[in-house]
Amino acid sequence: MVVIDAALVQKVAGLASLELSDAESTYALTHLGRILDYVAELERLPTAQLTALADAEALPAFERPDEVSLSLSAEAAMANAPAHQATAFQVPRIIE
Amino acid sequence: MSDLQPFSLTATSISQGVRSGEFSPREVADFYIARTERYSPGLNTHLYWDRDDIWQQVQKLEGRLRAKENLPLAGVPVLIKDNICTKGIPTTCASKMLAGFRPPYDATVVERLRQAGAVIFGKANCDEFAMGSSNEHSAYGPVLNPWNQAYVPGGSSGGSAAAVAADLAPVALGSDTGGSIRQPASFCGIAGMKPTYGRISRYGLVAYSSSLDQIGPMARTCADLALLVDVLSGHDPRDATSRADPYPTVAPQLTGPDALKGMRFGLVQEFFGSGLAEGTRAALTAAVQTLRDHGATVQEVSLPTIPLSVSAYYLIASAEASANLARFDGVRYGHRTSKSGLSLKQMLKASRSEGFGREVKQRIMLGTFALSAGYCDAYYAKAAAARRLITADFAAAFAKVDVLLAPNAPSAAFRIGEMEHDPLAMYLGDICTLGVNLAGLPALSVPGGFDPSGLPIGLQLIAPAWADGRLLRAAHAYEQAHPWAKEKQPLL
Amino acid sequence: MVYESVIGLEVHCQLATASKLFCGCSTKFGAAPNHQVCPICLGMPGVLPVLNKMAVDHAVSMALAIGGEVQEVSIFARKQYFYPDLPKGYQITQYDLPYCLGGAVTLGSGQRIALTRIHLEEDAGKNVHGDHASFVDCNRAGTPLMEIVSEPELRSAADAADYLRRVRAIVRCIGASDGNLEEGSFRCDANVSIRPVGATTLGTRCEIKNLNSFRNVERAINYEILRQSELLDQGLKITQQTLLFDANSGRTQPMRSKEESHDYRYFPDPDLPALVITKDRIERLRATLPELPEAARSRLMTTLGIGEASAELIASDRDTTVFFDRTLAAVGDAYPAPLIANWLIAELLPLTAERTWPDVVSCIPPRRAAALLQLIAAGTISGKIAKTVFEAMLASAEEPSAIVQRLGLVQISDEGAIAALIEQVLQQNAGQLAQYLNGKDKLFGFFVGQIMKASQGKMNPDLVNKILSDKLAQRRG
């Protein structure tokens, strides 16, 4: 199937918002490579419709009534925040 | 109270004893507090422990008992795996990413336990974010197997399994995505069950793989498993994947060894190849004989596509995990890097990279890759196709038999560090348990003997979807026919 | 070179539900930051989404209103990317299988604009930027949205604005959304490309995001068309990019953060069962659909003889249509529908600029408006005097007839009295009379003005005109 190279590892890490150390990148190269070689056995199977209708229909549909329930207090929402100003989560300045 | 002996109490006997007044919840709590404080540091089973909180719970419970409330789990200490949210109590998932994180809510299962009068008895160590089969991937150190502390207890619910095996609590909650309750139960000589997908609410279980995860009980007896399953089961309007129609309770379905008469068992032949350790093969063979001696029939069945389960599982589970773990970005909670002067993007990357351990990062990478443009059809979609084939194989097998039999792993527990260099080999060891999660079936491990070195081996039983009662009935019957757990205890 | 513009619009429309799409937090606008959040919309560990039934009902009603095909089974998918206002690191949306396909909206010009699809999704939170940091407010995260996607069949900025107004009128009419652009409950992205007239392939398109007023939609699209035309005229290529419109400069600018194309890694959300919409539910919702703007417009024009512009104005808003119909019913045959429409547009609609409809209706219920119109119809007051009466009606709950009596505004229709006053005025203005008789016809208006002044506007203007004309004609001989 696919050949894993350092560039692909970097690209995937970027998509996952991870920065790997050199050691971790090397490990990923080997590790991912071996796993992908192994899972190549799936190649011969017909591709499932990712719409996954069959899987989706296995679970009965479920909806809830449109009712407002008690939210968290803003203090509770901030309780685990690494950085916040008043009741807003603080992050480095976003440049747009 | 010194009358209480190790390895003598069960959740069933405690709740009966507390309700009848035979002993007080305080006595029970103190007994287990003493055992925990003595043995858990050496085994590293616990990530959170607060005995003052336990005594406070006991005090409230005593008030409820005086008010004559009906409490099916009155005074029963329950250890909670640390990937299950407990309000105000640190829930770390054994990760640096959630060090000190205190959820503002209880998981539904925790609410139900409290409601039933149980005492929440600390948080159990596990593999980080439930990803692992040995409890060697915790950011807070590995858990040791009480039967031999040079060996792993199994994973990812290693802390829960080891604690119950060492009688630090009569029962514990674990979670099972690919065998994470059954395999450690097997390695630690206790019973552990994964219910049918959708039976027990996942609300409050930190998601690893949403379509595979289930919470389940771990205990020394099947009767205790049943007691807990009945308390925890039922529709939760906060979990759209939990079944809404009512279904029968399981505890009343447990009778005795006579339930084995006429029961049809199927031995999954794909698990009995050359990779199976002799000790495990022998234990399974002996179990089959026990079943036959009690009037059950045992035949060979084939699940031809089950060998695909490692590929299907690791692609699906990693894909779902990569999305489920995307919320850990250091913005609203969890670890944020202390490096200064970073841009937002750099901050997200650094926080995630520092917070997650190596195995978690590798699975996120695998999952991200499997879903990425250009590869999604080849990997994720194929895995979904394999999943359907495996599910169909189980259904076909259940047309011929009532319960399937299998090992939980190719061998008993392995040495700490033994599999570190070969993650793929560790993944392959999961082959006995993964298919069950892919098909959403109920399955459990019940003690089934020991290997030549004295390490426990569990017998895995699998039933059709929603036949959890039948499953426990069969397991209980076997357990009564041969109560391995009573024969030997780990020396601590 | 002459180019044809090709425009497609994506509207993100917030649904009028009390709670969010997947949790029970309130959707009310204007709360202090993070005062309407819970573990679910904050994306805390262990939480799960559960679908809001009312959001689905609104969505289905919209599909029916625009003639789309409601899919019996549709799927929620995860769209993955990292951004601080996206708590879970993915948005729950619909990708491969949306709940509605097709449909159309007809413009005022008669052109039918086909829709590609409509789907349900959750909104993100909000980032606010300070000098050295940014701040994340998750109040809006999880609000239900309908994304309405048109085919690229619009051909001008004006048509684009017209399309938007009609879509807005529909969602407001069926109660699915309050369609408020300023508050952000109705947001529009425009995809704009150009091609030589007669070409069949599409040019490279640019996406202008988050246009927040009808005027800016038109300005932005017009600027973009110009920008692209100039580039092509110079022989340069159009780069596909995402743009923001700067209302101050009137120009579109590239968005920096969106330069890399995203790999969203869509896959079905395993926490949510498929959305199943039964035929029963569809029919039940169809039966509760109110008269839609297009049908109302037709009815006003064809059945009631109201002119196109007035019909458009009234039909574009359900509250206005309902008020008009109720007033008409109360007035009966006494006063013609087109005149009721004129009065409504001139006098009542301006009130809604400052007040909400419920306020307007409690002040001037249709029955009371009808009473005023009946006084005009009966000739008791003139249209001009009616304005004075109306102002008094806004200040008190008095019946119009009582106000007329109290202020002594009854119209004078006594021809004798009118004739007498006219004579008086003509005599007092002999100079102008002479000029008029010599041919200065314009002075007719002057005499009317003097008569009205002398009578404090109370003389029946039609009779004044008639009698004055007669008298002047007589004098001309």
Image: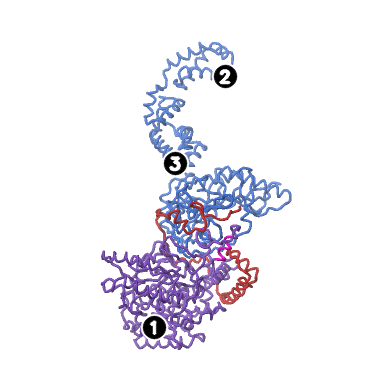
Chain colours: A red, B purple, C blue
In the rendered structure, which segment of residues is drawn in magenta?
Answer: B347-354
Check if residue B353 falls in the magenta segment. Answer: yes
Q: Would you name the residue on which mark 3 appears?
A: C319
What numbered label is drawn on residue C442?
Answer: 2
> What secondary structure is marked by label 1?
loop
Q: Amino acid at mark 3?
A: Asp
What x and y, as percent, mark residue B290?
A: 37, 87
Residue C418 or residue C162, whichever sits in front: C162
**The N terminus of chain B is located in which quarter?**
bottom left
Q: Is residue C284 above or below residue B63?
A: above
- Count of numbered badges drawn on the protein: 3
Q: CA distance from mark 1 to mark 2?
A: 118 Å
Q: Is residue B351 visible?
A: yes
Q: Residues within 10 Å of mark 1 (few under 14, many from 20)?
A: some
Is the stretch drawn in magenta largely helix, strand or loop?
helix
Q: Is residue B228 above or below residue B287?
A: above
The residue that appears at 65% across and 71% down in the rendered structure is A5
Q: Is residue B467 visible?
A: no
Q: Looking at the image, is mark 1 or mark 3 nearer the viewer?
A: 1
Q: Is residue C291 above or below residue B482?
A: above
What x and y, as percent, mark residue B18?
A: 29, 72
Q: Amino acid at mark 1?
A: Gln
